[in-house]
Image (cartoon, helix red, strand yellow):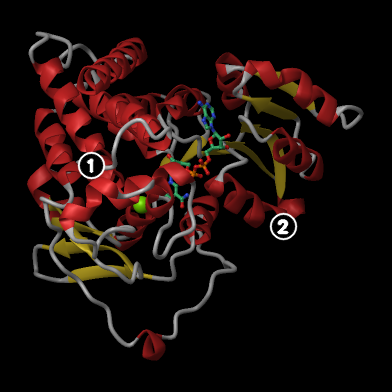
Amino acid sequence: MKRVTILGATGSIGQNTIDLIARDPDAYQVVALTGSGNIARLAADAIRLRAGLAVTADPARLQDLRDALAGSGVEAAAGPRALVEAASRPADWVMSAIVGAAGLAPGLAALEQGATLALANKESLVCAGSLVLATARANDARLLPVDSEHSAVFQALVGEDMSAVERIVITGSGGAFRDWPIEALEHATLAEASSHPNWDMGQRITIDSASMFNKGLELIETKEYFGVRPDQIETIIHPESLVHAIVGFRDGALMAHVGPPDMRHAIGYALHWPDRRHLPVARLDLAQVASLTFRAPDLTRYPALRLARAVMDRGGLSGAVFNAAKERALDAFIAGRIRFTDMAVVVEEVLTRFESEAGLIDAAMTLDNVTQTDHLARMRADQVMAERAG
Ligand code: NAD
Ligand code: MG
């Protein structure tokens, strides 16, 4: 039996992970499930999967969780420390599917106990790539990518030598607004930004797809995970979302990973790795697909890509600043306080302000420093937004 823990079990990735595990209940022992606001979902899955522990990130919901689990034998806990404790419980495989920088500390705790960490939470690598990789190495723990593009690259690299890799091409659908006139973007509504042309995902990553902040995070994730130079990473708009990534080798060969837009492929690959097992995903009919199209991204439409490039070049803790400012700007867009196009403006301004505060971005990459930088960047983002509003 494989002992598994799912961090962020109630979200889109978490639910897809549960879908796979529930198809073969005898193969898995569920150590812990975590969520935040959706107590009913968390409790129902914990009872159904006979989890040892269920944790909500929100301490105010502990009693609700206890009530929902009453008599089931599933232990209940709440709060950020309880999330880390859940991730520390001995497990063979831990899914990191919390959204945002909140996923970093629990993910590190899972690596510290030597578990294989299936990483959907790309923010961990953006904020603290070298810390995450060093923690995996120090504890002989395995880190497997779950983001579809990075799983695709990982699969294209099986049996290959990294020294033969010339470039990595990450595809992106272009999101909800890829065909909108640029002038219209500032009036984009929350509902419009929250619908993705091809993928069914959590709301935050869906909006980040429309702005391509998601692709920006993924560029940084690629650099950190695969250890390639920024100039070796390309991004291309591919509206069909069927080619997930392409690896270019020094002999000119391109290895593309093609499949339907279903996260259960990447999750299942990480769950069964190094085996490749049957997965319940649709099979592509290429004659029906008929054509695959690609076009260069327009950096005027997607300033997030330009900012992510600057972050890759800058290094240090600039990824933590970039992510935290983006999270705050996204909160403000969701709350209706700023416009869609303001998000990139706010993030750029926060990055600029950090540059003038000597030493902050070049501090050592420890969990404490990343956490402090994350908090400070959120404050700076709030300041920038208050100044712009006033
Ligand atoms: P989601 O919003 O659907 O779910 C997020 C999960 O995190 C939920 O379980 C929620 O309860 C929990 N959570 C939210 N805030 C939290 C906090 N402060 N502390 C602890 N837990 C918290 O998100 P999602 O779409 O499943 O994405 C999860 C992660 O996977 C993100 O990092 C995202 O970028 C990445 N990812 C998602 C997809 C996708 O298809 N959804 C694809 C690639 C990568
Ligand atoms: Mg992705």
Task: Answer with the quarter of the image where residue 67 lies.
Answer: top right
Residue in the image at 22% along x and 45% along y: 219
Observer-nearest of 201 and 19: 201
Task: Answer with the quarter of the image where residue 253 lies.
Answer: bottom left
Figure disc tally? 2
Dot 1 or dot 2, earlier in sequence:
2
Q: Disc 1, disc 2: CB below 8 Å?
A: no
* 49 relative to 298, above or below: above
* Residue 155 position within the rendered picture, expressed as x and y whole percent measured from the top left: 35, 60
Disc 1 secondary structure class? loop
Question: Alpha-carbon neighbours of circle 2 within 10 Å: few (<14), some, or many (≥20)?
Answer: few
Inspect this view and state whether residue 124 appears. Answer: no
Q: Where, quadrant-wise, is the C terminus in this rendering? A: top left
* Residue 388 position within the rendered picture, expressed as x and y whole percent measured from the top left: 20, 23
Q: Amino acid at mark 1?
A: Thr
Q: Is mark 1 within 8 Å of ligand 1?
A: no
CA gap, disc 1 and disc 2: 45 Å
Along the horizontal axis of the image, is 317 left or right of 105?
left
Along the horizontal axis of the image, is 294 left or right of 325?
left
Residue in the image at 22% along x and 19% along y: 384
* Residue 204 position within the rendered picture, expressed as x and y whole percent measured from the top left: 42, 42
Observer-nearest of 252 and 308: 308
Identify the residue under disc 2. Answer: 24
Residue in the image at 49% along x and 63% along y: 262
Question: Alpha-carbon neighbours of circle 1 within 10 Å: few (<14), some, or many (≥20)?
Answer: many
* 182 relative to 138, above or below: below
Disc 2 secondary structure class? loop
* 364 relative to 156, above or below: above
* Residue 85 position within the rendered picture, expressed as x and y whole percent measured from the top left: 60, 19
Disc on res. 341:
1
Inspect this view and state whether residue 24 appears. Answer: yes
Q: Amino acid at mark 2?
A: Asp
